[in-house]
Amino acid sequence: MKSFETVLLLTTALVLATPIAVAADDARQDFTLVNQTGFDVKSVYVSSHRTDKWEEDVLGDDHLDDGTSVNIHFPTKTKTCRFDIKVVYAIDDSDAVWKNIDLCKVSKITIFYNKKNDTTRAELE
């Protein structure tokens, strides 16, 4: 794998007139990241869109194996909704970045890798 060109595919589900119950300890920005790339991810960074610096790796010492998912939680006091996300692949340290994602409107992000055109894309739900 080389450096990835990133394609962002927005498939945001619209919920009409149906209130969504949120648990007391869940922040609006919490989401599930699903890895369907065919490769293991060694690091995931989530930072406010307003900063140029990446926060700490949310996986810590863990990896996100292909075909698995991880729930990413935010402190309930988090006010901002717009975040940038970066994943780093275990195989060669290449990465994919998505910017300005409104995590207040997204509960699941599934990432895919296309070997033919060497791109990673994300579907947001």
Image (tube, rainbow, N blue to C red):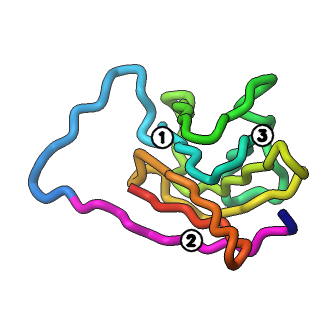
Q: Amino acid at mark 3?
A: Ser
Q: Amino acid at mark 2?
A: Leu
Label 1 SS: strand
Question: Compared with residue 15, is residue 69 higher up or lower down, i.e. above or below?
Answer: above
Which portion, as a residue range, is magenta? Answer: 3-14
Which residue is label 2 attached to? 8
Q: Quadrant of the N terminus?
A: bottom right
Give the quadrant of residue 3: bottom right
User: In the visual, does 73 lie left or right of 96?
Assistant: left
Could you classify mark 1 by the number of other residues whose Cα lies within 10 Å: few (under 14), some (14-19), or many (20 or more)?
Answer: many
Q: Which residue: 54% across, 43% down?
A: 33
What distance separates the C-alpha of mark 3 from that of mark 1? Answer: 16 Å
Total marks in image = 3
Say whether disc 3 or disc 1 marks the residue closer to the N-terminus: 1
Q: Is residue 16 magenta?
A: no
Q: Amino acid at mark 1?
A: Phe
Say whether disc 3 or disc 2 marks the residue closer to the N-terminus: 2
Answer whether labels 1 and 2 touch (C-beta < 8 Å): no
